Image (cartoon, rainbow, N blue to C red):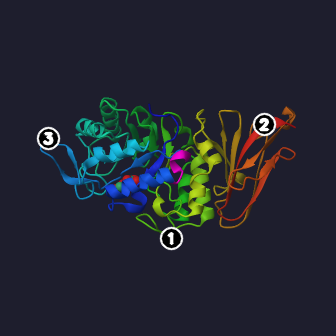
């Protein structure tokens, strides 16, 4: 069965776009296993757009491009499954995918059956070339239903970028995750914008249908399809921590075959992944320090009673950030204090006189996992 925690994996799009093939997918999957990423929780290998030929076969079925996938998709699925991984693919609710390959409009049932026959475990479903006269939620419900009737457990990953008030209807479609925003690019401004766009939609994420902030750019360093200016490692650390604390799915987007040690350290941070995967599935909440949109303090209550707390400095200068234990649910009169560890440095920390604080460089963050202990 599909686990009801935000999915983790690797996706071809951010770095490779149309330059995909069997060798790339299987060699990246091998690295997922050998590097320890699989052990850290990354299990879905997702082939995004551009895998198909431009037409369908006589029966109306999608056809993998034989130049890219010479042995077909079942072969890829079988190899991934043999490695203990899961296989994701991509289609779209419109006439064409975003890169203008055949898509599933009015072919939902036959496509779902085709994916099931290939051993697919995850379907990312896009929103391009949707007929204006067609209702997005109806098309998504149709694919959701087609997937639940295809004879295989396939995780439905909606990708309608928050359009047409997605948050109001996505929970009716059977989707396990929903893209809440437009596409990420490998630049600081994009990370900052995507975090700030979450403020209003936090009530719509969580168990059943996780709010997907888009694939990770950690470690891209300006290379690949969405590789723009790139970010510093400090900025990638903040990006990853925010996605974890906000319980977004974690889909790696860099070329893991050539990742450096800083990238691997970020992507395998156990404390942050533990917060993201917390099975109780409570929604995060946040405070804007002094009402400042660039100084969010993000909190998530965890299943064992711990409190995850992140200070995020989205400003371009240093910032002193704080929160009271009262705001975290622990008044001083409770006779309790908070005691824990910071996720990246491993530094021990405690609340002092009912306050937790941090001094942060520009674009830096600190995330703590606190226990509520006797004062
Ligand atoms: C859209 C999606 C991206 C990617 C591309 C593929 O832009 O939002 O994540 O799947 O399409 O064409």
Quarter occupied by the N terminus: top left
Name the main secondary structure of what is drawn in magenta. helix
Seen at 51% across and 62% down, the residue is 259
Residue placed under numbered mark 3 in the picture? 59
N-terminal of the pair, mark 1 or mark 3, is 3
The furthest residue to the left: 58
Seen at 19% across and 43% down, the residue is 61
225 horizontally vs 114: left or right: right
The 10 Å Cα crowd at callout 2, few under 14, some 14 to 19, many 20 or more, is: some
The 10 Å Cα crowd at callout 3, few under 14, some 14 to 19, many 20 or more, is: few
Residue placed under numbered mark 1 in the picture? 229
Seen at 56% across and 60% down, the residue is 263
Cα separation, mark 1 vs mark 3, equals: 45 Å
| Residue 75 x, y percent position in the rendering | 29, 46
176 horizontally vs 151: left or right: right
Q: Nearer the viewer, residue 28 or 286?
A: 28
Residue stretch rendered in magenta on the structure: 35-40
Residue placed under numbered mark 2 in the picture? 372
| Residue 35 x, y percent position in the rendering | 52, 54
Does residue 39 belong to the magenta stretch?
Answer: yes
Q: Secondary structure at mark 2?
A: strand
| Residue 244 x, y percent position in the rendering | 59, 47
Q: Nearer the viewer, residue 165 or 318?
A: 318
Say above or below: 207 vs 77: above
């Amino acid at each position: 069965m599909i686990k009801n925690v935000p999915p983790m994996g690797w996706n071809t799009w951010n770095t490779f776009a149309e330059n995909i093939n069997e060798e790339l997918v299987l060699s990246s999957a091998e690295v997922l296993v050998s590097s320890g990423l699989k052990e850290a929780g990354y299990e879905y290998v997702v082939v995004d757009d551009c895998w198909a030929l431009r037409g369908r076969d006589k029966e109306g079925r999608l056809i993998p491009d034989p130049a890219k996938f010479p042995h077909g998709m079942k072969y890829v699925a079988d190899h991934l499954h043999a490695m203990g991984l899961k296989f994701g693919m991509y289609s779209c609710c419109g006439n064409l995918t975003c890169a203008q390959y055949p898509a599933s409009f009015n072919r939902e049932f036959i496509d779902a059956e085709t994916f099931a026959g290939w051993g697919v475990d995850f379907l990312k479903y896009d929103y391009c070339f949707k007929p204006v006269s067609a209702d997005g939620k109806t098309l998504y419900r149709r694919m959701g239903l087609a997937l639940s009737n295809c004879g295989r457990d396939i995780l439905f990953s909606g990708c309608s970028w928050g359009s047409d008030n997605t948050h109001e209807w996505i929970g009716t479609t059977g989707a396990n995750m929903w893209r809440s925003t437009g596409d990420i690019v490998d630049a600081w401004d994009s990370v900052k914008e995507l975090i700030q766009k979450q403020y209003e939609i936090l009530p719509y994420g969580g168990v059943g249908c996780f709010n997907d902030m888009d694939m990770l750019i950690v470690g891209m360093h300006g290379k690949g399809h969405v590789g723009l200016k790139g970010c510093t490692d400090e900025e990638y650390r903040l990006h990853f921590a925010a996605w974890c604390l906000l319980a977004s799915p974690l889909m790696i987007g860099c070329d893991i075959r050539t990742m450096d040690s800083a990238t691997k350290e970020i992507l395998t941070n156990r404390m942050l992944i533990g917060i993201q995967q917390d099975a109780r599935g409570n929604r995060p909440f946040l405070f804007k320090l002094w009402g400042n949109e660039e100084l969010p303090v993000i909190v998530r209550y965890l299943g064992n009673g711990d409190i995850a707390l992140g200070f995020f400095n989205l400003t371009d200068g240093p910032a002193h950030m704080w929160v009271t234990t009262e705001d975290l649910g622990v008044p001083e009169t409770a006779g309790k204090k908070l005691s824990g560890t910071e996720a990246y440095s491993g530094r021990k920390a405690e609340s002092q006189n009912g306050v937790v604080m941090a001094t942060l460089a520009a674009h830096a963050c600190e995330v703590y996992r606190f226990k509520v202990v006797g004062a």
